[in-house]
Structure formats: structure tokens, C-alpha cells
Image (cartoon, helix red, strand yellow):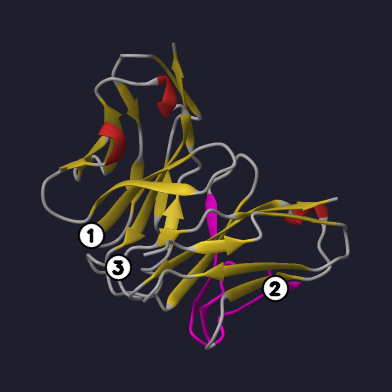
Amino acid sequence: NAGVMQNPRHLVRRRGQEARLRCSPMKGHSHVYWYRQLPEEGLKFMVYLQKENIIDESGMPKERFSAEFPKEGPSILRIQQVVRGDSAAYFCASSRHPWAGEDNEQFFGPGTRLTVL
Amino acid sequence: AQSVAQPEDQVNVAEGNPLTVKCTYSVSGNPYLFWYVQYPNRGLQFLLKYITGDNLVKGSYGFEAEFNKSQTSFHLKKPSALVSDSALYFCAVRGGTSTSGTYKYIFGTGTRLKVLA
């Protein structure tokens, strides 16, 4: 069973460009979470999605950031008009179930390292 | 509010000596506690978790952690450190109640472990 897949692993963008980060959850998982890790910091929750629904985007900046998890295909985190402060590692996690429970555990992907020049 | 504290930015230990990486938490309800390790330019790797049951949890690579409810701590330990254990370690907590936000992992800021040969 393949783990959570993220691509690209490294992404370089110039200020003002758009960044698209992709996440394919583990097989059988329909819940996806995005986290951001700024240099020398822990991971911060951004958004939680189920298929075709955004459940909680309380950790996502109000402007320039958006996320989707379509019925088919990977989840996409989109950052428009990137700025240098967006440079970070973006991690995706997936889980089988949404609620707390012994088997509900988030599995993390390898991350996408975004560098904004 | 849920929170996790890792009071030490860095821990240095000699190879072969026991190591401890500290973590304290604050959460309403029963806590679900996790330890992850991150090697340079890599994603998070799951080490171990506490959900319920025995307070001493054994995980990957010889690591273990002790859940102490009265001290709200979940320190990571290993009897004999290896140079290859040098990495960034994150403690995380997820609220174990059915209130909104239970799926959010709250991460500590990380502790850099350096094992000296």
C-alpha cells in the first residue's frame, strides 16, 4: 500500500507566480490535511478537506491560498502571486476517518519544499 | 486550547548514552500523543503513539515514550543513542474528544537531537 504521495518534491517560483502542490492520499483515505512548516518551526495546520468539500480552512491565509480535493484526482494546494514569505515545506497528510478514534491516524507525505526567489 | 511544548531546542548526547527528549501537552479530554522524526530534507516519519493503555509505549528504531497523565508529559526516550538518531523530533497532540477540531494535530516546535560520536 503506497503511502501519501506529494509532488513536486521541490518547487522554485519567482515572486508573483503561482504554485500548485499536489497530494495523493493513501488508498482508502478520503480525508486530506495540509500543513506548512516554516524554517526552524513546527508544522502548522492549514486546511482539512474531504472529497469535494472543505471542512476547515481556519489555518489558511485568507488571500492567495486555496485548496481543493476533487472527486477524482489528487488534492491541490494553490498559492497565487507567491511572495518570499511563502517559502516553506508544505506537508500533506491523509486519514481513513475524520473523527478521533484509535484507528484514525494521519499519515504524512514527504512534503513539497517551495522556494520563492 | 490544545498546545504542545518542547522546552529544549537542542539536546546533545554522547553515542551509547541514554537520551530523553521532553514534551508536555495541554488538551481537553483524552489526549492522543505522537512522536515524529524528521531527517534533513525529508518528511515526517512516525515513531510511536499513545492512545490508551500501557503508559510506556514502544516504537520504531528502539525509541519509547512514557505517558504521564499527572505531569501531562510524553517524553521520548532511548536507552542507547546512535549517531544516526541525530535528527529533528516533533511531539504532536490530537484532542481525543468529539468536539470540533479533534482532527487537528498540534505540533511542538521541534527538538534537534545531536548524538556525538
Q: Residue at x 40, y 60 (%)?
A: A107
Q: What residue sits right under mark 1 in the picture?
A: B30
- Give the image location of residue A73, x and y in percent: 56, 81
The mark lying in front, picked from 1 and 3, is: 3
> Answer yes or no: do the residues labelled 1 and 2 have beta carbons within 8 Å?
no
Q: Amino acid at mark 1?
A: Asn
Q: Residue at x 15, y 43 (%)?
A: B55
Q: What residue sits right under mark 2 in the picture?
A: A62
- Give the image location of residue A59, x and y in percent: 58, 67
Q: What residue sits right under mark 3 in the picture?
A: A104
Q: Amino acid at mark 3?
A: Asn
**Displayed quadrant of residue B61:** top left
Give the magenta part as a residue range.
A43-70
**SS at circle 2:** loop
- Give the image location of residue A17, x and y in percent: 86, 66
For the residues marked 1 and 2, what is the alpha-carbon distance in whole angstroms?
32 Å
Q: Looking at the image, which is closer to me, B38 or A99?
A: B38
Q: Amino acid at mark 2?
A: Lys
Provide the chain ID for the residue under circle 2. Answer: A
